[in-house]
Amino acid sequence: MKAILLTLALLCVEHSIHSAAAQTAPRVQVSGTAASVTASANQLVLKTDTGDSIAVTTTEKTAILHFPPGVTDPTKATKMGLGELQPGDRVVAYYRGAAGDKQITATTLVVRTTADLGEIAKAELGDWKKRGMAGNVVTVDPAAKTITVKSGARTITVTTTDKTEYHRYSPDSAKAADAKPSNFAAIKVGDQVRVLGNKNDDGTADAAESIYAGEFRQLAATVVSVNAANGEMQVKDLATKKPLTIKTDSDSTLKKLDPQMAAMLARRYGAGRGQGGQAQEGQAAGGPPPGGDGRGGGDGRGAGGGRGGRGGDIGGMIDRSPAIQVSDLKPGDAVLVLTTVGSDPSRVTCVQLLAGVDPILTASPNSTRDLLGGWNLGGGGGEGQ
């Protein structure tokens, strides 16, 4: 919604500045990030959101306007010089010509600096932590445009409107920044979602302003080999017995349970299985896994909100467990892993990994879903934007 309001405001800027010009060429806009700025030549290179590079030339008539965070009113924008732009600044360039031109002369440049973007991301992350919710889709009602989400031990009905914004996670990333615009029809049962919106008083309903949805894998595996230099590991999926390459990045969260905690959880899950109550134990532990920029900690742990929706204190216990590196893993280690689905199913990206789980898998081999379900993908849609 904020992006839409800003775009409308920018269109008003462009219209007010150039409406008097008697020009017949269509007015076009392109947005992206400044890759380089050469003020002496009145030029910059714009890396567009679609990955193209555009050479942008300015003239003495080009209006360069700075919109600080929170400002959408054109009258409150401040003028700036081309020499004040820096690589990484966000730029919307308006010009007259054809869409897709690789060399343009800008009539207006609207700028948000890297500092602005940092403030915006911080504010959005705070909003996601305050009003965000993560969970697993259990039902979808296309007629009512509602979804039912299991978030920890709680079931929440998520309502949508024509103003709800939708994004879908990339098959190879849990970052909100890598998610693509989507729609309600793309949401399906089993998806992990992050929802930003206002909840009712008892927390059983959520009016969605923004939804990030995607499919993620969770598995128990044994480490076969580790390549710490490139952050990858080869594992054997204990369910399928097939090999799998798992890569990690700066947004991957790796934790290890201490032996005492692992033994306690093994008793808990083992007791649940012995009573024939694995499903009940899973709900107590947090239910199906939640969904995943802005995850808690990176830009990504895009598009959802905060570490809400845990059942019991399992998520909190895992959060407090010490972080580890790929190099700390050894062949033969048992791990529980939440990963992307991967455009290549044999090669996926780690979202969260939990080591030190040998006693748990021995006591309850099928506890993967339940245990990871208590450890929510945190973070906001704004994170990692």
Image: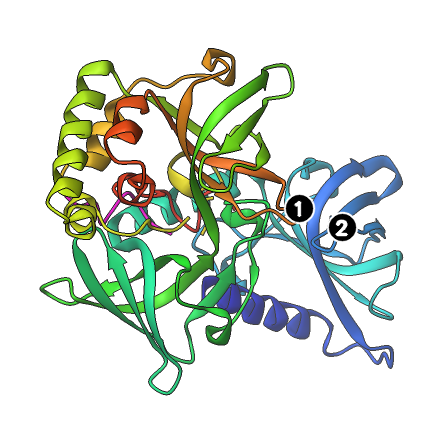
Q: What residue is disc 1 on?
A: 344
Q: Secondary structure at mark 2?
A: loop
For disc 1, the neighbor class at 10 Å (few under 14, some 14 to 19, many from 20) is: few
Horizontal side of 276 relative to 257 (left or right) equals left
Q: Residue at x 28, y 54 (%)?
A: 133
Q: Quadrant of residue 238?
A: top left
For the residues bearing labels 2 and 1, Cβ distance under 8 angstroms: no
- In the picture, the quarter occupied by the N terminus is bottom left
Is there any visible trace of residue 269 in the rendered image?
yes
Task: Give 347 or 206, whichever is nearer the viewer.
Answer: 347
Q: Residue at x 88, y 62 (%)?
A: 101
| Residue 132 is covered by the magenta coloring | no
What segment carries the magenta color? 304-311
Horizontal side of 354 relative to 247 (left or right) equals left
Task: Give the image location of residue 109, x and y in percent.
Answer: 70, 55
Mark sitting on residue 51: 2
The kind of residue tagged 2 is Gly
Task: Give the image location of residue 92, x and y in percent.
Answer: 67, 57
For disc 2, the neighbor class at 10 Å (few under 14, some 14 to 19, many from 20) is: few
The kind of residue tagged 1 is Asp
Question: What predominant SS class does the magenta segment belong to?
Answer: loop
Q: Residue at x 29, y 46 (%)?
A: 129
363 w.r.t. 342: above or below: above
Q: Residue at x 26, y 23 (%)?
A: 359
Q: Secondary structure at mark 1?
A: loop
Distance (Cα) linking label 2 and label 1? 22 Å
Task: Give the image location of residue 220, x and y in percent.
Answer: 41, 35
